[in-house]
Image: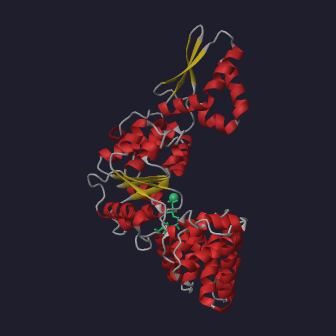
């Protein structure tokens, strides 16, 4: 029976998968209604159970209707002999074996370092990281860990925040700082890479070497841990590595898109341990931070980008720094290529597609808010009866923009501005257009606001 089940499975999964996972299975005790299959390690057992468990059961039943259950168990040394020698032997050792017992199989240090040596992006340094309210705490924690890894209270360091807010940047910065002296070994990898390397190690029957490598570093950084959600075997492996390292006084740094407690789908005990050190979140950027980042990047590029363009970008692209940076880079490349200065007009042209993606329908409330902010007046003055020029002019601009950017009728607009009459709105629209004709500074302000709001 077993041979037929095996052959059918082999036919279904293909030669490579079969050889990787299923040649390791051997048939264990048979009972009337239960079949036991043995695997050499817990990992393999879980893997086979997860990937092929149901199918194995179905195939057995089809083959032998008496069989109700297929049990998968771990048995030491249960490997089918293969032509390879030493490597195979170490791969048979179950996961549970403590690192100390297998340290003899440790490859030379140089090899470890090379293999896991962090491919750190040299641009991602502390110097190039712009600090503002939303990220100052995470930044301070990162600096602290780079100065004094493994200090109590900072291990693990857990950085979390939305996409493109600088998690990877900070991790690389820590890595670069720590490896400067050449004394500290740092392994940086994404959780995804971690998983693939782990699987590759299993395939090449070198999990022990992989574990040894990981456990020999001073600092282990795993980026985007949320990738491990639902990947139970890899989580398990990470958990063991994590414990071994922390127990040995090594520093762990992890990033994710959510806080440990919100990472549902990660094993509870892993979440608990992740939250035990320092948890630092990077908040969404503020307008001020976006401006600072743009200024820093524009300065570094050597291309002059007018403040109005930076403001425009910081208003338009609010989702994440990566997109903001991408937009600016495109402007800069364009300016360099054509030797033309960057202007608001050229920005709109060059970034047409990006900006369009960020467009949304604008509301009168939004217009009022933006205009009030721009001229530094209170939002309530948009509907107040005050007639002072400093208040009345911005109010007129807001009405003008409401007419231009929304499909609201004049009476509707009037109502939103403290129940004003539609003739007041009409008058405001005409007045603003008229001032724009003769006052270019004013016209530019209104244009800027319009571009920022445009939907
Ligand atoms: P995450 O890993 O959180 O998704 P990244 O670290 O990859 O984000 O950041 C995306 C891009 O934005 C990178 O090019 C990074 O250098 C840049 N970036 C993010 N935050 C900042 C910041 N505060 N200062 C300078 N650049 C930043
Ligand atoms: Mg990242």
Q: Residue at image x 66%, y 92%?
A: 438
361 or 377: nearer the viewer: 377
**Nearer to the camera, 146 or 294:** 294
**Furthest residue in direction left, as rendered:** 152
Quarter of the picture holding the C terminus: bottom right
Location of the N terminus (image quadrant): top right
Q: Residue furthest bottom?
A: 438
The color scheme shown is: secondary structure
Is residue 359 in sight in this rendering? no
Q: Measured from the top left, where is residue 322 in percent x and y?
A: 56, 66
Q: Is residue 165 left or right of residue 145?
A: right
User: Which of the pair 176/411 is nearer the observer?
Assistant: 411
Q: Position of residue 349 (x, y in %)?
A: 71, 78
Residue 265, placed above or below residue 138: above
Is residue 271 shown left or right of residue 354? left
Query: How many dots with numbers?
Result: 0
Is any atom of residue 277 visible in this view? yes
Relative to 339, say whether 232 is above or below. above
In the rendered image, the vertical position of residue 121 relative to residue 241, given as above or below: below
Tell me which residue sits at (64%, 82%) in the image: 344
Q: Seen from this angle, which residue lies furthest top?
A: 32
In the image, 218 versus 277, the foreground residue is: 277
Residue 431's spot in the image, x, y percent?
A: 66, 83
Percent of width and height locating residue 192:
54, 49
Residue 101 falls in image quadrant = top left
């Amino acid at each position: 029976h077993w041979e037929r089940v095996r052959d059918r499975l082999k036919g279904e999964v293909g030669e490579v998968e079969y050889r990787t996972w299923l040649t390791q299975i051997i048939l264990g005790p048979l009972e009337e209604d239960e079949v036991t299959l043995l695997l050499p390690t817990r990992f393999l057992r879980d893997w086979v159970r997860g990937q092929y468990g149901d199918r194995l059961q179905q195939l057995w039943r089809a083959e032998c209707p008496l069989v109700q259950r297929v049990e998968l168990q771990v048995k030491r040394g249960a490997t089918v002999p293969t032509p390879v020698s030493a490597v195979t032997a170490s791969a048979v050792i179950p996961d549970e074996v403590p690192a100390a017992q297998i340290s003899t199989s440790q490859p030379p240090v140089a090899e470890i370092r090379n293999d896991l040596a962090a491919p750190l992006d040299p641009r991602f340094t502390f110097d190039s990281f712009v600090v503002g309210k939303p990220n100052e705490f995470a930044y301070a924690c990162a600096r602290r860990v780079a100065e004094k890894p493994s200090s109590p209270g900072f291990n693990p360091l857990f950085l979390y925040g939305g996409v493109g807010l600088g998690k990877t940047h900070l991790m690389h910065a820590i890595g670069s700082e720590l490896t400067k002296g050449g004394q500290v070994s740092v392994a940086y990898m994404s959780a995804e890479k971690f998983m693939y390397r782990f699987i590759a190690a299993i395939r090449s029957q070198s999990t022990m070497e992989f574990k040894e490598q990981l456990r020999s570093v001073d600092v282990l950084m795993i980026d985007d841990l949320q990738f491990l959600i639902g990947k139970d075997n890899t989580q398990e492996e990470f958990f063991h590595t994590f414990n071994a390292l922390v127990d040995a006084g090594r520093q762990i740094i992890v990033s994710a898109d959510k806080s440990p407690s919100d990472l549902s789908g990660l094993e509870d005990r892993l979440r608990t341990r992740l939250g035990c050190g320092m948890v630092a979140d990077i908040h969404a950027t503020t307008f001020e931070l976006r401006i600072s980042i743009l200024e820093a990047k524009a300065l570094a590029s050597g291309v002059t980008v007018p403040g109005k363009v930076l403001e425009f970008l910081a208003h338009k692209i609010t989702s994440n720094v990566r997109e903001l940076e991408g937009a600016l880079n495109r402007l800069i490349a364009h300016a360099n290529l054509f030797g033309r200065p960057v202007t608001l007009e050229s920005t709109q042209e060059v970034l047409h597609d990006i900006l369009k993606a960020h467009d949304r329908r604008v509301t009168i409330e939004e217009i009022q808010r933006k205009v009030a902010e721009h001229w530094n007046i209170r939002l309530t003055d948009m509907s107040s009866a005050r007639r002072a020029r400093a208040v009345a002019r911005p109010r007129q601009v807001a009405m003008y923009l409401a007419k231009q950017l929304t499909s609201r009728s004049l009476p509707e607009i009037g109502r939103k501005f403290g129940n004003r009459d539609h003739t007041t709105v009409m008058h405001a629209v005409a007045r603003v257009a008229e001032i724009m004709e003769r006052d270019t500074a004013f016209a530019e302000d209104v244009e800027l606001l319009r571009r920022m709001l445009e939907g």
